[in-house]
Amino acid sequence: MAAGTSIGLFGPNGHGKTTLLMTISGIIDPWRGDILFEGERLNREGERKSQLSRNINYDVIRRRRMDPKKVARAGLIHVSQGNTLYPEMTIAETLAIAPIAANGRVEETESLDKVYSLFPKLYERQDQKARFLSGGERQMLSVSAALMAAPKLLLLDEPTLGLSPKLRLELAEAIRAIKADGVPLLVVDQDVEFLESLIDTLYLFDHGRISRRIEKEDLPSYEEIMSLLFEGAS
């Protein structure tokens, strides 16, 4: 992707979009290939070797090809699908540890002001533990923690999934504001209209492969996109 642009991934559930994001961010160790960001190789060279036993942790017997800490320090920040917060930590505590991943890229106080401006609900409830937050508030906190890490590229995996229409709209507006502030995005979502408001290029994902690239100005309707996916699968 070109510097400063945002892209979307769209495709049926179970076809590997989440797996791709988890591999890029180093949560899943890639078998082969290279992951490069801003000219820097994020994975070690060579192929991942086969696991000797299903009963032994792979990391115990083989050296991983990816280090998630290195990925985060490079500025690739991933907001994964679902609730991955520490439930006993407060909003303020969560946002206080997030800048560790920023690797000195930004002033912490400045980032905190931006986050609370973007999500005033979090400021009002900053002493509340994550486990007492609603689903929408937890997602706001997840996105806020990612912003505190000063992303050079923000990976969002179905950020509004399962939210009420009101909270979905609220979070979608905040993500559009993040994009407008100059943060490039890589977004997975099932809502084409939502993606269209954020991205420069859409990639159709089919059975673990990119089947088509579509520029924003050529973006068809949801029905036409589904036809393209099924056409590619036939």
Image (spheres, rainbow, N blue to C red):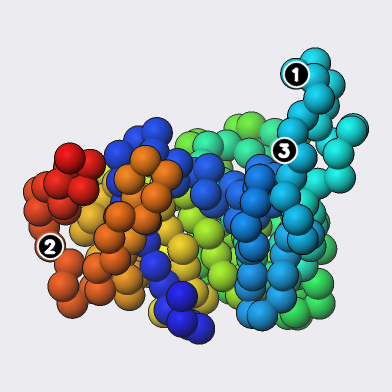
Task: Name the image quarter holding residue 14.
Answer: top left
Q: Nearer the viewer, mark 2 or mark 1?
A: 1
Q: Image point 17% across, 40% down: which residue?
A: 234
Q: Is residue 147 above or below residue 63?
A: below
Label 1 neighbour load within 10 Å: few <14, some 14-19, many 20+? few
Q: Secondary structure at mark 1?
A: loop
Residue at the disc numbered 1: 54
The residue nearer to you, when weighing 89 against 11, is 11
Residue at the disc numbered 3: 86
Q: Image point 72% across, 50% down: which residue?
A: 47
Q: Residue furthest top?
A: 55
Tell me if 19 is positioned left or right of 60 in this view.
Answer: left
* Residue 230 % position (x, y): 17, 42
Q: Secondary structure at mark 3?
A: loop
Residue at the disc numbered 2: 220
Q: Decide which of tag 3 and tag 1 comes sooner along the chain.
A: 1
Q: Decide which of tag 2 and tag 1 comes sooner along the chain.
A: 1
CA gap, disc 3 to disc 2? 40 Å
What amino acid is found at the position of numbered circle 3 in the picture? Answer: Tyr
Q: Residue furthest right?
A: 60
